[in-house]
Image (cartoon, grey):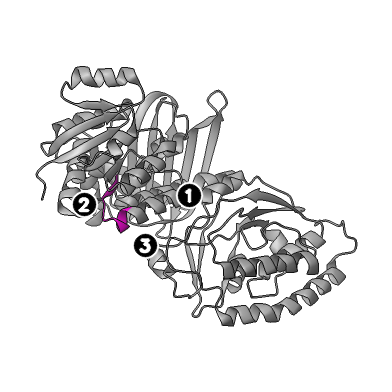
Amino acid sequence: MKSKLNIGLIGYGYWGTNLLRNIVQQPLSGKVIVCDTNEERLRTVQTIFINLETTASPADIFQNAEIDAVVIATPTSSHYPLAKEALLQGKHVLVEKPLSTSVTEVEDLIAIAKARNLVLMVDHIYLYNPVIHQLKKYISEEFLGRINYIDATRINLGIYQDDINVLWDLACHDISIINYLIGERPKTARAIGKLNFNNKVEDLAYLFLEYESGLLVQINGSWASPVKIRKMIIGGEKKMIIYDDIESTNKLIIYDYMSNGTPDQNKSKLIDYRLGDITIPKYEITEPLSNVMAEFYDCILNNRSPLSDGINALDVVIHSAIEMGGKMGSSYEVIVVDDGSNDGSEEVLSQYKPIKYIRHATNKGIGAALRTGYEAAGMEYVCAVPGDGQFDLSELLAVKPFKFDQFYSFYRPSTDYSAYRKALTKINKLLNKYMLGIKLRDVNWIKVYRKEQLDFVKPELYSSIVESEICCKLIKSGSKPIELPSVYHARKSGVAKGGHWHTLKKAIREIAALYFVTKRFNKKYVQTEDQGLN
């Protein structure tokens, strides 16, 4: 086993300076190379750290056989390509938060790191703060009683980011802390943000989370505050805790409280709430970032997974993705339909606790899974996506609120399908065009409907051509598709089972049924070809 690790740091900006200081201070650090495209920053490095090497090209670090690990502290948009290249070159990777703003990109990095037995870590530094560990102990031991609410405030004046908004920059800290403390995923999530028109990014946002246990969470993030506040209030049935990270010494304060009900002639009961004892607990004092670096080194040398690994980062990305839902509506729900196929999906799903979970006992095909998801949906807009990473959810940000006479249809310019499956897709496209008059580029890819539209067309088929049925009925009743290009991503696990003979045979049987279903719909609901939904 190596006694020291050679490190390459990419990015010597605001956070990179802190990372380099901790890298140099680590006794297990060997050779260190610093990379930045800004020559003035590199000159600063050479002035402060005389013995360190510098370069303006990340390739000099990736292609250096002596480098064991790469630490990345660059703008968020560059995290994925840099981290991916480092992993492909056999380097362990530590990335400044957030790992990425794309679930698909995070999943890709996780898969690469796992396949090559490399450490992938994100510097969610609060997970390595002794104060947070003390909070975790209190909650695990039910010292506070059942947790009723968490109110987090993380505000300051600037610094504005070019490629992410305030939720990604600040709220991801609170999300990672709450994930660690609670160990539960929310059932609903809502976000409200205000755009700064000068910087073209949201600089003020509120995030609301609700959990099955009854826990309510509110997170306030802002770059537009005249004061800097880093405070979290955790309210339990027995006690309350205030965690103030700005405080230099008394970061934790515990409050006992009691309530006393007395009769009142004007009110049914008058509740008197009183604070009891106030306790300021002791805790270990160490620098969280130093603990992050120590953890990173130890995981590499001892071949173990860090607390803030790629899976933890994926949790943060999924939670932060509520920004997307917030832009499409005031709230949204997640429904996971397990189609019962033996294709590796169960392994993927086992990592998460879906908000609403529906499982088919046997694999009835994609059509049945779509029908189940659509019928269970309760929000204004409905979208079904594959759970194996083929579609990047961030593409839904291009969808804007639409009326009853519109729906969105994504299409794939290219895929990695086999020749057999491409042939089936081509046949299906011709069928839709000449038999049903549907001229969509990709009938069987991602759609976004209004719930009222699905209720109106009342899908009847259960095979994979149910999407053809829905689109045909909507178009015949006057709705116009808005088509958007979509990047197809290779499956992250298993292989497709949709081409099995029993599901293919069912689809063939329903081709004829589709014609009569749509004909019957036209006769019953459509009076003229240009009639819309009213």
Tell me: 504 left or right of 515. Answer: left
Badge 3 or badge 1: first in the primary sequence: 1
Q: Are marks 3 and 2 in contact (CB under 8 Å)?
A: no
Mark 1 lies on a secondary structure that is: loop
Question: Is residue 477 placed above or below 76 in the rendered structure?
Answer: below
Residue occupying image coordinates x 48% and y 47%? 321
Is residue 114 a member of the stretch shown in magenta?
Answer: yes
According to the picture, the residue beneath numbered tag 1 turns out to be: 265
Query: Magenta region: which residues?
Result: 113-121
Q: Amino acid at mark 2?
A: Lys
- Give, as a three-letter code, the residue at label 3: Gln
Q: Residue 187: x percent and y percent?
A: 46, 57
Gap in angstroms between the C-alphas marked 3 and 1: 54 Å
Q: Nearer the viewer, residue 172 or 120?
A: 120
Q: Is disc 2 placed on a helix, strand or loop?
A: helix
Quadrant (top left/top right/bottom left/bottom right) for the C terminus = bottom right
Mark pair 3, 2: CA separation: 23 Å
Mark in front: 3 vs 2: 3
Q: Position of residue 519 (x, y in %)?
A: 83, 73
Disc 3, SS: loop
Answer with mark 2 or mark 1, whichever residue precedes in sequence.
2
Q: Toward the viewer: 513 or 485? A: 485
Horizontally, residue 30 falls left or right of residue 184, namely: left
**Residue 240, horizontal then vertical, whole percent:** 29, 45
Q: Which residue is mark 3?
A: 351
Check the image and report above or below for 111 versus 248.
below
Q: Which residue is mark 2?
A: 137
Q: CA distance from mark 2 to mark 1?
A: 44 Å
Q: Residue at position x 90%, y 64% from top? A: 527
